[in-house]
Amino acid sequence: MNICTSDIEKLDALIEGAKGIVITAHIHPDGDAAGSTNALLSYLRSRGKENVRIVYPEPLADTISFVAAGSDKSLVLDAVTAPEGCRTAVVSADLIFCLDCNSFTRTGVLEDMMRSSSASKVLIDHHLNPDVEAYDLVFSTPQVSSASELLYNILLALPDVAGNVSRLPRSSAEALMTGMTTDTNNFSNSVYPSTFAMASGLLDAGVDRDGILQKLFNEYRENRLRMMGWLLYENMKITDAGVAYMVVTSDIAERFGILEGETEGFVNLPLAIGRVKMSLFLKIDGNGFFRVSVRSKKGYSSNLCATRYFHGGGHENASGGRLFFPQDIAAPEAAAAYIERVTDELFKEEGYV
Ligand code: 5GP
Ligand code: MN
């Protein structure tokens, strides 16, 4: 991995001189956002930094909140349950880290606060199209599994860790393994040689991978599986071009009593079907839009789909965005027709059919 020595020196000096540090990540923080932020928090604390806070735009979903269990609860804030605490932390920060997030645009209600802060700003991310102008120091590469993997390599390059994984605090190592595991769907996508090297290094240092897998994949509520079965049987549609989609409206979400985070991963399931090239998962959000997840097989661009038709972006084969009503579609019921129309157009324009 190409991490520039002079950038590491700059980062080390920024950390050394910082009196107040804020770490943030994207809206709807997922496993990688949770893993990378908590890993950095533990590292900075072990380095003697007293005044460090994680500031999320929204709380962690219950399904991944275990990642923060190793962190002091008073240091992990979100703008929904502790808006004033977040404001105070950002205003008093002289160093801000933005993780798993390519732009402050993706930090929701925190965006203006982050942009107007005079703190030094460091980006550590793996998404396409980073907003490099907004940061003083940029670590950005799409050629890694996750922000957690990039952070792992940055931490190892810092002089006090000096390549010795066992010098990372245990909670930091566990959080990094968790973030990488969720973004790769447990090694089924976005895996590079450096990803296995990271896993090997962390296992060698004693990380309990079995325990992490148990918490990530085997402790769901029954509702999730019932809903998954129903969606695949009753709700999933597949177009002639090979685009599968599922649309979760409020009545469906209510029927299964589904909570934030409990539909994570559903978008991947239709890709198991041979003729499916791309999969879209739409879930209603109370604020007048659908949250959209897009996944695709190699050679079909989720990123183009999310950017052109859903005000979003992300990675080549895993992206997300939003579909607004009444702006994009007249009403929620029109989502299916919209998906079919735009994906047909995309597949024709890009020569996928
Ligand atoms: P997910 O479908 O899991 O929510 O997101 C898949 C990927 O797309 C993640 O890397 C996520 O950060 C990115 N993503 C999700 N929503 C958006 C969005 O609205 N805009 C951009 N630029 N990226 C998004
Ligand atoms: Mn990520």
Image (cartoon, rainbow, N blue to C red):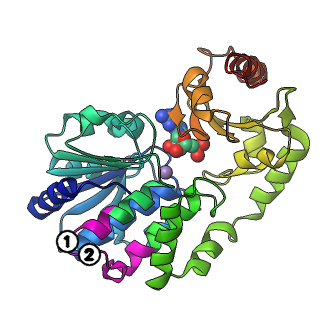
Residue depicted at 34% across the width and 54% down the height: 2
Q: Is residue 173 visible?
A: yes
- Of 294 and 3, nearer the camera is 3
Q: Farthest residue toward the right?
A: 233
**Is residue 147 shown left or right of residue 261?**
left
x and y percentages locating residue 284 in the rendered image = 66, 35
> Of helix, strand and loop, which one carries label 1?
loop
Is residue 70 at all visible to an observer of this figure? no
In the rendered image, residue 251 lying in the magenta stretch gets the answer no
Residue 278 against residue 172 in the figure, above or below: above
Q: Residue at x 62, y 19 (%)?
A: 325
Q: Quadrant of the C terminus?
A: top right
Q: Which residue is mark 2?
A: 161
Residue in the picture at 46% in, 77% down: 202
Instruction: Check contact, mark 2 vs mark 1: CB within 8 A.
Output: yes
Badge 2: how crowded within 10 Å, few (<14), some, or many (20+)?
some
**What residue lies at 33% left-to-right and 77% top-to-bottom?**
168
Helix, strand or loop at mark 2 = loop
Q: Amino acid at mark 1?
A: Pro
Examine the rendered structure and indicate whether residue 22 appears above or below residue 194.
above
Disc 1 designates what residue? 159
Establish if 329 lies above or below 19. above
Magenta stretch containing residue 167, yes or no?
yes
